[in-house]
Image (tube, rainbow, N blue to C red):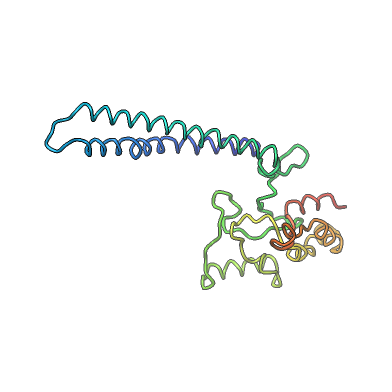
Amino acid sequence: MNLDALHAQLSVKIVLRTLPLLAVLTLLTGLVYPALSALVAQTPRGSSFNPRYFQTIMKTIIQSLRILAVLTLLTGVIYPLAVTGVARMAFQDAATGSIVKSGAAEIGSALLAQKTESAKYFWPRPSAGDYATVASGASNKGPTSADLVKSIAERRDKYGKDAPDELLTASGSGLDPHLSPAAAKYQSGRIAAERKLSVEKLNALVDQLTEGPQFGFLGQPRVNVLALNLALDQLK
């Protein structure tokens, strides 16, 4: 199953699980409660039920249902379809998840880090959620956390005692697809030994794929790990 189909299937499941709860809450808060409140407020104390008040309430309910239907159509159907249509025309790649392909096969997204443990490839930053998109996020562990100290020690054993901080600490999302050029070049020695390539050739590849700050001033230079690994497989 490709990623687009998986996303569509997940979206349908979320909508189907949400709609019943939304319908009940809408019925209770938007119709039943206001109707009963208005009925109580308009019925004179000490008098019996008057059909005129019931007709007024029914008119209010019908008007509310019409407004609900119109707003649901506008905000739940027309607006999402319009935004999706414009996005797919103006930003085709981004609107479909920035999917990266190798030939006809979809191998990932340029926006999400992937778990990579082979010594022949560049490794992304650590992830507190083990690169799972559903459980993405930081560990929220403070500097006094024994678990955090243990995790950093284990990563230092994996990456080396001189590893830069970004290879020892997880990113805020746990899915950061980029590394700094320095963190990528730090791994060149390991990859060069595995692939029988020169470190200089790998560093040149990192420089070639390094992206500058966004709009020239936002953020720092960075390199996409997935793009780097794909280009790495093309080196000889």
Q: Is residue 168 left or right of residue 70?
A: right
Q: Residue furthest left?
A: 46
Q: Residue at x 42, y 33 (%)?
A: 67
Residue 166 image position (x, y, % from top left): 66, 65
Closer to us: 223 or 46? 46
Q: Is residue 185 left or right of residue 141?
A: right
Q: Quadrant of residue 164?
A: bottom right
Closer to us: 75 or 123? 75
Residue 108 image position (x, y, % from top left): 69, 45
Q: Is residue 63 left or right of residue 213?
A: left
Q: Residue at x 59, y 57 (%)?
A: 173
Q: Quadrant of residue 68?
A: top left
Q: Residue at x 26, y 37 (%)?
A: 38
Residue 186 image position (x, y, % from top left): 76, 66
Closer to us: 183 or 193? 183
Residue 100 image position (x, y, % from top left): 72, 44
**Is 34 drawn above or below residue 203 in the view shown?**
above
The N terminus: image quadrant = top right
